[in-house]
Amino acid sequence: MHVVGIIGGAVAGSEAAAMVAESGALAVVFEQGDRPYGKIEDGLPRWHEKLRAKEFAQIDAKLSHANVRFVPRTAVGRDVDLGTLRELGFSALVLANGAWRDRRLPVDGVDAFVGKGFAYQNDFVYWFNHKHESSYDGPVYEAPEGALVVGGGLASIDVVKILSLETNARALRAAGHEVDVHELELKGIPAWCAARDIPLPDVKPPTLVYRRDMESMPLASFPPGADDARKAKVRASRVKIMKRVIDRYRVDFQPLRTPVGLLTEGERLVGLRLQHTELVDGRVRAVEGAVDEVRSPLVVSSIGSVPAPMGGVPMRGDLYDFESEETGALRDVPGVFGLGNVLTGRGNIKESRLNAQTVARALLSARLEAEVAAGAAAAAFDAAREAVRSEAKERLDVTLGGPAPSPETREAIERFVKERWAAVGYEGDYARWADAHRPE
């Protein structure tokens, strides 16, 4: 029997585990936290309640298979070395741990102000999704009026929406109104207020800062082989999406600006120096001598995510060093393969390779288009699973076609798994564990 180790249990990891298990092999899934839901839980804003519940159930079903060994609270690089896993003799190891580290904002000295007027997207959205939980002990942020968000993609729209929803909800509650943020997001702030004959709150909106223009925002992609007419339609759809965000969620948008310096007071960041830019033959170019100083009580960077470094995994810049995205083979580390976001650290990798974060972000554009049916979100995630499954099949066909580990090797792996279970207090019953660790 083959035994495949899978690092990460969310969409990509659970799909790989299900494929291994259904083939008759054993899948061992190492999950860094209590729950395997990844960015479905921590990166997709919590107003997507029904979608999140549906995806949790999908992952639960796959990890409950009799041929899956779930190992929670076990981060590779923190609790166990990649080298140790390789020495155990797995048929293969699959890196499905996603992209959890924010791409650094390229302004000198900015990281000294994390938690002091500056935040990165992943931590900020994690706070928003979990701050209501009684056991939450992560970073704490305020959502002040007039915040700046540096980005331009769908993830940055998540952030600017969170800021506006939080500030408007706070103002409405202060005026004596009961507010549910989920309903406020669903209806849109002006429509929610109009339905109750309530004046719009007098709050300073957050501003999304983007180095390109609205037509260039990565909110919709050109299909392969698109002609000029099709590209024009895509550009128009980007503008339509962003204008709907501005109108429904009361946010501002500042195109053709990029941060080049910091405004500070003591130990706090209080704004940014924004360089004016222009597009020349599709490239961003600085406008000489044109710099604004924009004050803000909070700056959130949302310019992309990359995989967290892992001991034993070679790096190429901010990314893991794979021989190619097509094979997913890790360079010079035989038997280790990448799957999903960990390959590139981007949410929208290629149209031909959908993955969980791509679709999660694309849901925003679907929600903002009135003509999109309610079932579009579910269909999008189904497409993502199928694409990840196809990608995993390419990896596993090679692995499961070779010689299987010896019975002694399988027994050693099972012993290791049981030792980890004992160390983290897991008794081997995934359904019971999942029920006991549901998100609040």
Image: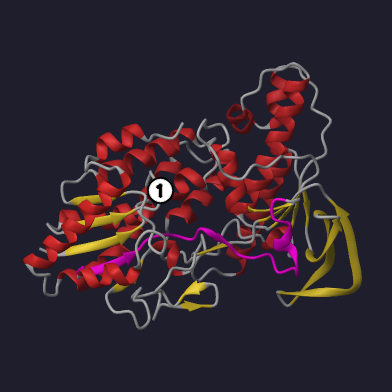
Callout 1 crowding tier (Cα within 10 Å): few <14, some 14–19, many ≥20: some
Q: Name, please, the residue furthest toward the right.
A: 289
Whole-percent x, y for residue 134 in the image: 52, 30
Q: Is residue 294 left or right of residue 149?
A: right
Is residue 363 among what the camera can see?
A: yes
The answer to whether 181 is drawn above or below residue 147 in the figure is above
| Residue designated by label 1 | 33
Residue 18 in sight here: no
Query: Which residue: 72% across, 61% down?
Result: 112
Magenta highlight on residue 96: yes
Query: In the rendered view, does 335 fall on the left or right side of 26?
Result: right
Task: Give, as a single range, the part of the protein colored magenta.
Answer: 90-115
Is-magenta flag for residue 216? no
243, 392: nearer the viewer: 392
Q: Quadrant of residue 281?
A: bottom right
Q: Residue at x 37, y 40 (%)?
A: 56
**Placement of 64 over or under 135, stated as above or below:** below
